Image (cartoon, helix red, strand yellow):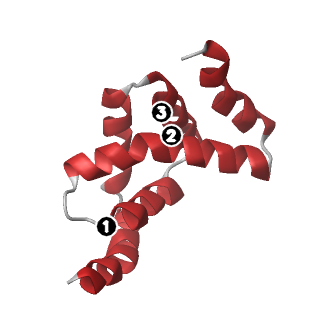
Amino acid sequence: MRREVLLLPALLVACNTPLADAVARDAARRAVDPVVAERFPGVPLKPATDCIIDNASAQEILTLASAAGSGANDTAARIVLDVAARPDTIQCIAAEGLPVLIDTL
């Protein structure tokens, strides 16, 4: 992958604009989705990923966005597991993911 593409999320986050935030969060989702799918089988992917992104710090989102472009799976996994263990994230996943899970039964 081209180096410019890898730097795009970092540059946009540095701009600190709503567009930059949205681009960084979208890039971070690409790193979070595979970790959630592997580590939390059966948990609805989209709500869990959204909860993890929403409860991650700006620095964690930036790191995840960079990991998505570079393939740094160990870094992404560590951050995802750390954020997923936070009480607010657990509450969010229960509130947002449980209805989705029940609807699939």
Which kind of residue does numbered mark 3 sit on? Ala
- Callout 3 secondary element: helix
Residue at the location (64% across, 23% down)?
5
Which kind of residue does numbered mark 2 sit on? Glu
Which residue lies under the disc numbered 3?
Answer: 68
- Residue 43 spot, x, y in % from top left: 25, 65
Quarter of the view holding residue 23: top right
Mark 1, residues whose alpha carbon is within 10 Å: few (<14), some, or many (≥20)? Answer: some
Circle nearer the N terminus (1, 2): 1
Which residue lies under the disc numbered 1?
Answer: 44
Residues at badges 1 and 2 in contact (C-beta under 8 Å)?
Answer: no
Residues at badges 3 and 1 in contact (C-beta under 8 Å)?
Answer: no
Whole-number angstrom distance, CA of label 3 to CA of label 1: 20 Å
Q: Which of marks 1 and 2 is in front?
A: 1
Mark 2, residues whose alpha carbon is within 10 Å: few (<14), some, or many (≥20)? Answer: some
Residue at the location (38% across, 35% down)?
76
Which residue lies under the disc numbered 2?
Answer: 60
Which kind of residue does numbered mark 1 sit on? Pro
View extreme (top): residue: 3
Circle nearer the N terminus (2, 3): 2
Q: Which of marks 2 and 3 is in front?
A: 3
Residue at the location (43% across, 39% down)?
31
- Residue 75 spot, x, y in % from top left: 37, 29
Residue at the location (47% across, 33% down)?
68
- Residue 36 spot, x, y in % from top left: 30, 51
